[in-house]
Amino acid sequence: MAAPRAPLSRRVFLRGAILASGVAMSRCAPAPTPLTAVVPPDAQAVPGAAPTPPLTPPSASQPPARIVQGTLRVLGEAGLFLALERGYFDEERLQLELVDVTGTDQLLLALSNGQLTASTAPVSAAIFNAVGRGIPVKIVAPLGTNRPGASANFLMVRAGLIESGQIAELRDIAGHMLAKAGSGTVADYGAAVIVERAGLPPDAVGLVEMRDEDAITALRNAAVDLAFVTEPLATVTEDLRIAVKWKSIGDLLPGLQPGCILFGPDLLASRPEVGRRWMRAYLRGVRDYDAAMGRPSGRQEVGAILARHTPVRDLRLYNRMGFVSLDPGGRVDEALLSEQLAWYREQGLVTTPVDLQQILEPRFARDSAARLGPYSKP
């Protein structure tokens, strides 16, 4: 590895990136709103394709059911934001109140004690451990699915290593340092699988834990050679010629679903019909997203909505960023999730007795997809 250049102040570097790109350098999450402060959604109708025909709504005399919805403000929540802005939750007589969440432990506690009704979350060992300890939450649907040609997560390599030909094939990552998110995450599992598929021993690649923005600084200063980076930071980093979006996670680990939707005991046990109505509205948003991604104007259509709900304000970025696939049926890839659970156990990251069926509750998505009827991408 080349000797690191003199480090640039993190604050100075990130300020320059912000000015150059028009987007905040973060993990696509703004400063969190405390869970005790409920934030009503700022939703406005957005012109676009004809929405999915409405289902027979609950009685107009029925008061709206309140849902306190945890959100990470990430791009993979596009289905949620489309459903919110196009009035699908309103049609189901649901009043969504968005609360920004950070930290899996925080949101799991909030779900279990009723402070949150539902939430998006990164898949991690923490969820498996929590369910194993009896925390009453379940995964009811995935967020984005990384597929070839549809991925928002990338293995990035320092530009100089690509230009010099030092890294050309997957096995060339041996002896280099890779930055990834914290321990017990999908990035942990992904790094291990990629090293194995490269035909390398587990210790062939050095691993260091850092947030995306810190990893970008480290790439620039040659403190690391590779990093897992999510959009929009991956495109911004490539624009600044710091690193190259070398391989997408959709190509390396097709089918990987790094995020999920969690229901707490309120929707799982106390108000399951409300949970089904939530899922129907959500899947309508997912289907709108999937249809939009097949149209030339779809990225801007979706981007106009995401720009109001995530820190990615620059609509030009949406034309160049990678987008994940969203499953119109809300199906979790159980085989891949089972592999992750097994790997977490092998590494000692999941220490509680738990099996996959304790974690998953697919009936909400399955029943809602059946109620919506067959879906074919236009």
Image (tube, rainbow, N blue to C red):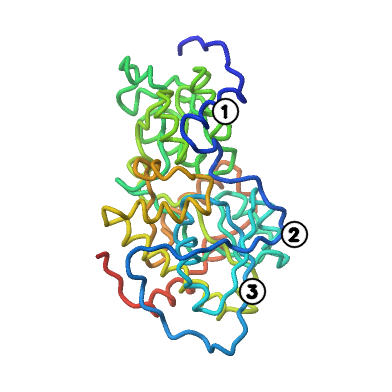
Q: Looking at the image, which residue is at 26% across and 53% down?
A: 296
Residue placed under numbered mark 2 in the picture: 36
**Residue closer to the observer: 90 or 348:** 90
Residue 308: x and y in percent read 51, 53
Q: Callout 2 environment at 10 Å: few (<14), some (14 to 19), or many (20+)? A: few
Q: Residue at x 60, y 80 (%)?
A: 64
Residue shown at 52% from the left, 39% from the top = 188
- Camera-side residue of 358 and 225: 225
- Point out which mark residue 81 bears: none
Q: Which numbered disc, 3 or 1, marks the residue closer to the eye?
A: 1
Q: Quadrant of residue 128?
A: bottom right
Label 1: element kind: helix
Task: Decide: is 79 above or below 320.
Answer: below
Marks 3/2: CA distance? 15 Å
Mark 3 crowd level (few <14, some 14–19, many ≥20, 10 Å Cα): few
Image quadrant in which you'd find residue 66? bottom right
| Residue 156 x %, y % | 41, 30
Q: What amino acid is labelled 3 in the image?
A: Arg
Q: Which residue is mark 1?
A: 15
- Residues at badges 3 and 2 in contact (C-beta under 8 Å)? no
Query: In x, y percent, where is residue 212?
Result: 53, 35
Amino acid type of disc 1?
Answer: Arg
Label 2 to label 1, Cα distance in Å? 31 Å
Nearer-the-camera pick, 50 or 142: 50
Q: Give the number of the disc on residue 66.
A: 3
Q: Is residue 352 above or below residue 316?
A: below
Look at the image and tell me in which quarter the C terminus lies: bottom left
Secondary structure of the residue carrying tag 2 is loop
